[in-house]
Amino acid sequence: MDETRRAFLDDLLATPSPSGFETAAQRVWTDYVGEFADRVDTDAYGNAVAVHEGDPDAPTVAVTGHADEIGFIVRDVLDDGFLRIGRIGGADRTVSKGQHVTVHADDPVQGVIGQTAIHLRDGDEEYEDVAGQFVDIGAADADEARDHVEVGDPVTFSSGLRDLVGDRIAAPRGVDNRAGTWAAAEGLRRAAEADVDATVYAVSTVQEEVGLRGARMVGVDLDDVDAFVAVDVTHATDNPDVDRERRGPVELGAGPVIGRGSANHPGLVDLARDAAADADVDVQLQAAGTRTGTDADAFYTTRGGTPALNVSIPNRYMHTPVEVIDTADLDGVADLLAAVAAAAGDREGASDPFAVDV
């Protein structure tokens, strides 16, 4: 990954974006795509769309990622100055205690999620629900705490991005799914640079982690899209704690993951696999027998059924403060998206370019 693309990724990962509070990250994204897109739009809830205008007779393809991340939210200020929190999305109660956090008030406030010292605990205790955990910002009482924060402020982990060996990075938050919005933006840039015939939308959606909300809005609003490709992270199964026999083989550094089954349209699966082979992009396959768990599940049921595909980035330790990805996989996804857009453009003139032949 070159320095410019890495700087964009770093900016995205450094910008907190819990569900319902995505504005700052969307500004980073729109500033970047504005350098090469023909047009950039946003809607009332902050979904962001950039477009490469292609041949009007060629198909229209949307490549998407969701901008939001899991986190916490202040739900009460206690008399002694501690903050009770609730979940935003699928925050994991087993990894939250003892972590540094930032409360995103008007002026951000640093804190920690309290963890009683091992010396004062009675043996092996079960993990408390997030609702039973608390943030310590150092306030002496409720009045002092309320001078800095208020109910409804979002909270995220606050340690920094780390480079690991080779092309791999670890981040405390936001890989799921700023990696996907990076790939959507980069896929658009590479498609525009190649001047593909297809019209290509890159989309950064909001509120995926709380129910695919942004994708439902976009799926209706972009009524000229012939196919959606939703990029998200998926579970890498190449670390010692994961039962590969149950999850299937997905490895870091082995390339993008193409889903098969459920929302994944068979015609798009074939097109993506052929495009990957033509572009010399190594890919992995993943079974999705019931659902993908991504925005593709919202897109494919819009407007009476719109072809959709889930392309994934392998991610170790998802929804923890130590998510690990390989940046070579990210580049591979961006190349794949551009190749899919080019292949879609070759279907110019078809009235229903991705219809299943039955």
Image (cartoon, helix red, strand yellow):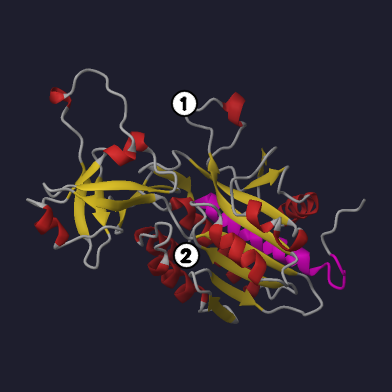
Residue at the limit of the structure toward the left, as seen here:
140
Q: Is residue 124 one of those drawn in magenta?
A: no
| Residue 347 inside the magenta-drawn segment | yes
Find residue 135 and report its horizontal and vertical position in percent.
21, 46
**Which residue ends up furthest to the top in the rendered image?**
123
Find residue 252 and report its horizontal and vertical position in percent. Answer: 53, 41
Q: Position of residue 131 (x, y in %)?
A: 31, 41
Q: Amino acid at mark 1?
A: Pro
Does residue 355 appear left or right of residue 169 in this picture?
Answer: right
Mark identifier at residue 40? none
Query: How busy is the neighbourhood of tag 1: few (under 14 within 10 Å), some, or many (20 plus)?
Result: few
Residue highlighted by disc 1: 240
- For mark 2, give the secondary structure: helix
Question: Which segment is the magenta one?
Answer: 327-352
Q: Which residue is mark 2?
A: 5
Magenta stretch: helix, strand or loop mostly: helix
* Residue 247 can be seen in this image: yes
Q: Is residue 316 above or below residue 1?
A: above
Residue 25: percent from the left, percent from the top? 41, 66
Query: In the picture provided, is 354 more to the left or to the right than 158?
Result: right
The kind of secondary structure element at disc 1 is loop
Q: 184 or 305, which is in the foreground?
A: 305
Q: Amino acid at mark 2?
A: Arg
Total number of numbered labels?
Answer: 2
Name the residue at the right extreme. Answer: 358
Please state which of residues 5 and 184 is positioned toward the viewer in this rendering: 184
Residue at the image point whose x is 67% and y is 47% from the top? 258
Q: CA distance from mark 1 to mark 2?
A: 31 Å
In primary-sequence order, the first of circles 1 and 2 is 2
Identify which residue is drawn at 65% across, 64% down: 219
